[in-house]
Amino acid sequence: MAKLSRRQFIAGGLGVTGAVATGVALDQAWTLFAREDLIPGAAPSVDLLPGAWTSTPDRLTFAAVGDTGSGGRQAAAVAERMALTYRDAPFGLVAMLGDICYYGSVKDRFHDVFIRPMTPLIDAGVTFELAVGNHDGGLHYSDASLEEIDAQLDRLGTPARYYVSQHGPAEFFYLDSSEPGFFEDGALTQLEWLDDHLASSTSQWKIVAMHHPVYSCGVHGPTARLKEYLEPILVRHKVDLVLSGHDHNYERTVPIDGITYVVSGGGCKTTSINPQPSTEFAASTLEFMVFDIDGDRLTGRAVQADGDVLDRFELRAREGR
């Protein structure tokens, strides 16, 4: 098979784009590249010390990753790097940013797409929390779609399609950003729920996690309904960080009304980027995130499958809530 490599980066407003396909036409290259996530990968073989992380009222280390659900070689590479990262800097939570299963039902593929690649972290006692994804085909809330959602929630022990969890100094607000689930029966039920819970939150850090990005320079781009209906709530309640997937790349925005938006959708495959004025850093690469919170300081790292740190940034908890 022809070899293909593709990578795109932007930092500080300067972009570099490259695509190399050896032995095939360029219009065939992307098809070959997309199939990389279908090649079976070896399950990670990493022994981890269970419960090795530190979590106190002031400290928390957690990971985040989206779009992991191929069960292929690239997904296995990301999962293995997550396990190796845990070994050096343990974390007790992984925020799954949607699309944990592609190419079939999660009932049939759960072992291949989740248990098999994540076994070292599962055996170490790490908690996995899920933001509902859309499986790249759109959820129309048919009976089959609802059954698939319920199956994912059940297998990961997720309490609902949208919910709150507390970990040390951070409160996580997980949303179902799919259509039409975002607007239940034409009412803004989920938005009203979020507005109320953010208003009553006393946590030092407020982190919102969902599948679709508010801002994105990836193939899908920004999500108009989220910008219109959700962003004002995030701004009003001074949310610190918004995590999403959906676009298969990494992106961090400049602070927008005090909020940093991060896309981490490189869990098993990559797609192109088109940097926007809101983009601080972006890359089309396999990756996941690690966050360290210590009091009023949060440090984020985007880690590639080869272990290189792609991006590093620091936030301070917002005051005057």
Image (cartoon, rainbow, N blue to C red):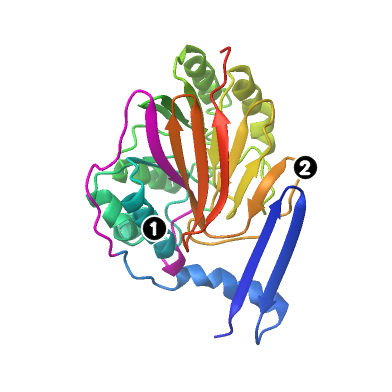
- Disc 1 is placed on an element classified as helix
Q: Is residue 233 above or below residue 41?
A: above
**Residue underneath mark 2:** 277
**Residue underneath mark 1:** 79
Relative placement, left or right, of 37 versus 231 is left
Residue 220: in sight, yes or no?
no
Residue 125: in sight, yes or no?
yes
Please state, as top left, top right, bottom left or bottom right, where the C terminus lies in the image: top right
Q: Who's the residue at 59% across and 20% down the image?
A: 238
Q: Amino acid at mark 2?
A: Pro
Segment tinted magenta in the rendering = 45-74
| Residue 74 point in image, percent of width and height | 46, 66
Q: Kindly indicate the quadrant of the structure image that contains residue 253.
A: top right
Q: Kindly indicate the quadrant of the structure image that contains residue 239.
A: top right
Q: Are marks 2 and 1 in contact (CB under 8 Å)?
A: no
Frontmost residue, 121 versus 27? 121
Q: Of callouts 2 and 1, which one flags the residue occurring earlier in the amino acid sequence?
A: 1
Calculate the distance from the C-alpha at mark 2 to the C-alpha at mark 1.
Answer: 32 Å
Magenta stretch: helix, strand or loop mostly: loop
Q: Does the magenta run of residues contain 69?
A: yes
Q: Does the magenta run of residues contain 109?
A: no
| Residue 91 point in image, percent of width and height | 35, 42
| Residue 195 point in image, percent of width and height | 54, 18
Task: Determine crowd level at label 2: few under 14, some 14-19, many 20+ residues with C-alpha closer than 10 A.
Answer: few
Residue 137's label in the rendered image is none
| Residue 305 point in image, percent of width and height | 47, 61
Relative placement, left or right, of 164 versus 7 is left
Q: Who's the residue at 43% across and 26% down the image?
A: 170
